[in-house]
Amino acid sequence: MKLPSAESRRASTADGPAVLAPPGRKPGRLALSSVIRSPYLSSGTAILILSLLLIFSGPDFLTAANGIAIIYEVSLVALLAIGETMILISAGVDLSAGSLLGLSGTVGAWVIVSHHMPSAVGIIVCLGVGALGGLVNGVCCAFTSISPFIVTLAVSSVAVGLTLVISQGNTISPLPNAYDWLGAATWGEVPYLFFLIIALFIAAEFMLRRSVIGRELYALGGNPRAAAMAGISKRRLQIGVYTTAGLLYGIAGLAQVGILGAATTGAGSDDLLTPIAAAVIGGVSLFGGEGSVVGAGLGIIVIGLINDGLGLRNISTFYTSIVYGVVIFLAVLGDSARRSAVRRRQA
Amino acid sequence: MTASVSSASPAISLAGVGKRYGNTHALRDVSLDIAPGTIVGLVGENGAGKSTLVKLLSGGEQPTIGRVEIDGRLVNDIGPKAIYELGVRVVYQEGSFIDQIPLYENLVLYERTAGRSFLFDRKAAVRRTEDVLRTLNVRASMATEIVANLSPSERQIAEVGRCLINAGAITILDEPTSSLSKQGAHQVMEAVSRLGQAGTTVIYVSHILEEVLEVCQRVIVLRDGQVAGDRPVADWELRELVNAIVGRNLETQLERARERAADPGPDASQNGRQADTVLALRDVSYHGLHGVSLAVRPGEIVGVAGIGGSGKSLLGRLISGREPLRYDGSIEVMGTEARAMSRKRMMRRVGYLPSDRAREGLNPLGTVGHNLVMGKRDGSAVFIRKAQEDALAQSCIDTYRVRCRGAKDPIGQLSGGNQQKVLLARAYLGDPHFVVLDEPTRGIDIGARNEIYEQIRRRAAEGTTTIVISNEPEEIAALADRAVVMQRGEIVTELPRPTREEVYEATVS
């Protein structure tokens, strides 16, 4: 096939000859073709390679303590990535994930410390601020013709500013244990947060695969006009998905405060693109309609291994973003090669 | 095909050409000579080998056996780029323009000689574009207009113009008029004739046989990868051509089907008088619609005919809830004013098949099953019952004879006709009050078309009220119990049991 991808998409929907490839399922080929078809090929390979490198370069990788360290390292981004993935599937994008994380944790801490509210109120405010930020994103995307990229960039900027205004640039602490609980409490060594994240991944994956709304998100991402003609309400879905994602950012904000024991102004500021990167490494399409939360989870593991590995091997964090860049590029390159291989088999 | 033509060396020559994909013979032993400056029609059902032949001529594929020559040069293995250099141009259905820039820039973009100087000579580019447009006998002012502002037929003509400005010696047109109104199609065909007069060899691939007979000098029929007929146009009659394409006597089939449809006719109209109307429009006005009144009885097939831009698609979207319900007048669905319903409910209760399969119908990333049930909620269900959905999808595949391995096939794997059947099945899903089918057979082959006609008639016989919107008089005649004809947003005529000629006359008069 020498055709570019746009051409092949055109060719596949146009009225071409009805070439249906014969099933041709020999046992050996079946295994191979299901590997090639798997959207997890790229991220899975990256995890395998990174793990092997780390296992054979020192004894400190396969330890419980290191496992816990990785969990702490990626848990916040993992929460953000769940929301981000759902938005990407609907053909949107959210640049405000990290800044809403920061804002929600800060506002929750602020009402407790400065206004002497009980922890329960602080928690509700924290989650509420996240959800509200998401709602603003969703409403602006649904009711204006401004692209999600711009809407969420603006909301992100406002959120960063509000965080600074409310905290006056100061770290807010000390905080009551109840407010810290989500990020701080552990079961043995394992933070409860880890189990919450696993549960949320399963719930989100189930929601996307088996709920009517999940199905509609994929349809919206695959072809917005066709979805509209089929009676799927874009506005309702957009508002719902951005708000849900916002709630997840709020949970991440709460967890972040708990992990540090304080609300800091810089929280989440490194997370502008990391959730998107994780999703993309895990096979989520930036153009919508393709991908899964589980894929994004694998992307998160890739990012966790990179961070962890650089730390274990005493490589300066200055190199982190270089390694990120290369890994993201290779993972997406691998995924697009896989997709065109699948398409070739279909054509 | 006179002596003078045959004495010249052929522009295109195929000798014993075959193309095989695995065990499938897409083309078998095709031998043809095409003289320079001829307009040749290439017709056949989908899968007959037209696309394959076009690919061989444009270098997209190589023949398995035989010789393909262009201007006496063997081009079996030289690839698309070298074939382009030889002057072969293909104009695809979807077009290739960049929408946001003027036409002349688009045309000159394709011109390789533009690279000779660093600076872009705007005046010269405009002048050349205008020349080409004049050659094609269309308004020269199109040259400086943004492509997005051109009408569909103007765009298509400009695509033809692209071949002229490039001095293409051989032009292959793939379904150049299928998305156009009759009028637009005529303009395009005139442009094609002029292209022929300018000395270009044209291969005109189309499903619209009347047009092929009108514009071409010679018509070649492909069937099952072989040449099933090849005559000068004067020696073809429409009926013979159809028979050659399908390899069976289609007329009798159509007639039989019409008899069947005609049989319950009187019954239906009697019922109609007794039963309530399913849909009643009284003096409806909307952006682009003026004072439309129409009553549709249960089980009826009402055809809506008209040329492109007559407002018939808009009407279809309005009565199916695919437009905001901000109209003047009254639209009653099963006795309830549409305005009093939510659009959501309207969309759920009225089946709709959009005219543009790729843009408005399909999710290209989904499976057959996903596309079947898209937007169809099972009441207020939150979760999908997988087993139930699979069973539903499979029953649709069986009922509508969608050719695929199963509901899990990616939709892109299906041919256009089968994709259309999926959309048709979706329109009928969920027991709608009535269905609106906008161009139900656009761009698909005669075989799939007949299958779709059968399904529409079957559903109507089972009591589903149907509104068929179509550009093609033949389609309205084949399906409709009654037709209304639209012009400029108004219903101008109503025709009981119309014939093709009646519909055609009413749409253009």
Image: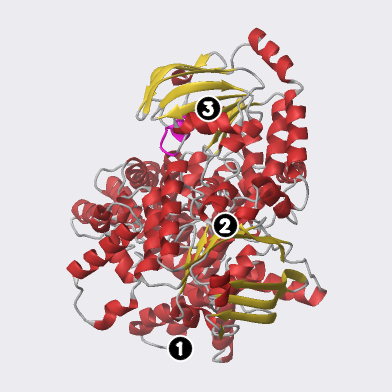
Q: Compared with residue B9, is residue A174 higher up or lower down, i.e. above or below? A: above
Nearer to us in this view, B502 or A302? B502
- Label disc, if present, on residue A70 of the rendered structure: none
User: Seen in the image, is B127 located left or right of residue B64?
Assistant: left
Q: Residue at x 44, y 47 (%)?
A: B186
Residue to which mark 3 is pinned: B345
Stretch of the chain drawn in magenta: B308-318
Q: Please identify the quarter of the rendering in which residue B282 is found.
A: top left
Q: What element carries label 3?
A: helix
Whole-percent x, y for residue B34 in the image: 58, 71
Whole-percent x, y for residue B195 in the image: 42, 62
Q: Residue at x 70, y 17 (%)?
A: B268
Residue to which mark 2 is pinned: A13
Q: Which residue is drawn at 53% across and 41% down?
A: B354
Answer few, some or many: residues within 10 Å of disc 3's Cα (few below 14, many 20 plus, some between 14 and 19).
few
Closer to the camera: disc 1 or disc 3? Answer: 3
User: Seen in the image, is A61 located left or right of residue B220?
Assistant: left
Q: Do the residues labelled 3 and 2 touch (CB within 8 Å)?
A: no
Residue B79 in magenta stretch: no
Residue to which mark 1 is pinned: A313
CA separation in Å, label 1 and label 3: 61 Å
Question: Tag 1: residue type?
Answer: Arg
CA separation in Å, label 3 and label 2: 30 Å
Nearer to us in this view, B5 or B89? B5
Quarter that holds the C terminus of chain B: top left
Q: Compared with residue A180, is residue B499 higher up or lower down, i.e. above or below? A: above
Q: Is the magenta stretch mostly helix, strand or loop?
A: helix
Nearer to us in this view, B250 or A334? B250
Q: Which of marks 2 and 1 is nearer the N terminus?
A: 2
Whole-percent x, y for residue A312 in the image: 46, 85
Question: Tag 3: residue type?
Answer: Arg
